[in-house]
Image (cartoon, grey):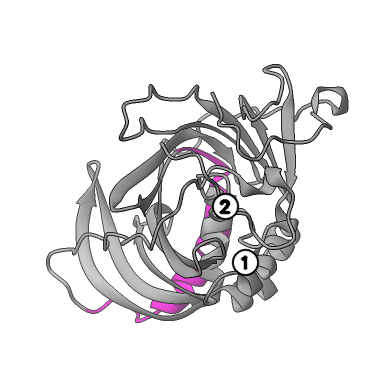
Amino acid sequence: MDRRQHRRAGKTAVTVGLVIGLGAGATGCGGATAEGAGGDPGDQTVTLLTRAADTLRSTRTSKATTSMEMATGGTRVTIRGKGVYDYDKQLGKLTVVLPQDPAGTPEHRPITELLAPGALFMKNRGAGVPADKWVRVDTAALSDGNLVTGGATDPYAAAELLRGTRTATYVGRTELAGTEVRHYRGTADLAAAARSASAGHRASLAAAAKGFATAEVPFDAYLDDQGRIRKLRERFSFVNDSRQGTVAVASTTLLYDFGTPVAVELPRPQDIYAGRIAENQPAH
């Protein structure tokens, strides 16, 4: 993979994160269209979506898989993650895998990410960071609020973004991994989401509202009959300063196995790397 990473305005090398070698603009795939489209019973579509994060918090935990799609010089790239999340504590753990590059370079070592209110911790980050050390990133200092930088959108932050839902339509019922779900399509406003978000994600979403090319986020959401998010696909747009173009990234989150045991232990201060990150050195 081309390891040239665009540097967001005013940030140190560590904030460049895992969104790497971005080209002229990725084309995000649209959400799947459900069959049997019809009116949503009760016609409470927007209200249901704005409360989706609260519904997740009441379910406490789940497993999660993530994918982030982009294009680099005409080549589609997907970064994948898998892990668990505690919505009550707003703590998560993901293993993120970077793909093999077109030149045939082997896949990089999986990167462990710990997600916490206001912070992202990464291990096996590479770029000169010792293998036994963590890198800590202040997500409120990122111009995308860590919706893109880490190569995986924080599942609870993705749900909180729906608090800013402005318009939404009910597409219909479909099945997802054996579960009946309702498919909704709409647009959320990042600034509105930030105003209604929990304290842990308010600053990060506010930063994204200012840093993205547009505060409007198109989405496709799939909710089960309990109102829990099963699949959420969001499309972000930001300016790639190095190439003076707008880049689109599609982020998809799948949630399942609700109630699964989750234990996330954050790094001790002495385990966090305090040195400078080598901006152009790839993660291994």
Tag 2: amino acid: Tyr
Locate residue 107, reporting x and y percent: 40, 24
- In the rendered image, residue 41 lying in the magenta stretch gets the answer yes
Q: Residue at x 79, y 29 (%)?
A: 273
Q: Secondary structure at mark 1?
A: helix
Q: Quadrant of residue 186?
A: bottom left
**Above or below, comparing residue 23 to residue 267 in the picture:** below
Residue furthest to the right: 270
Closest to the observer, 185 or 113: 113
Please report the residue visible at 71 percent of the width from the left and 17 percent of the height from the top.
Answer: 132
Using the image, determine if residue 175 lies above or below residue 206. Answer: above
Q: Earlier in the sequence, mark 1 or mark 2?
A: 2
Tell me the SS state at disc 2. Answer: helix
Q: Is residue 116 left or right of residue 156?
A: right
> Disc number at residue 156?
2
Is 162 included in the stretch rendered in magenta? no
Q: Is the residue under label 2 in contact with that under label 1 (CB below 8 Å)?
A: no
Quarter of the image for residue 204 reads bottom right
Q: Residue 74: which disc? A: none
Residue type beneath disc 1: Ala
* In-front residue for pair 132/175: 132
Q: Is residue 227 visible?
A: yes
Q: Residues within 10 Å of mark 1 (few under 14, many from 20)?
A: many
Q: Which residue is under mark 1?
A: 208
Query: Which residues lie in the magenta part?
Result: 39-64
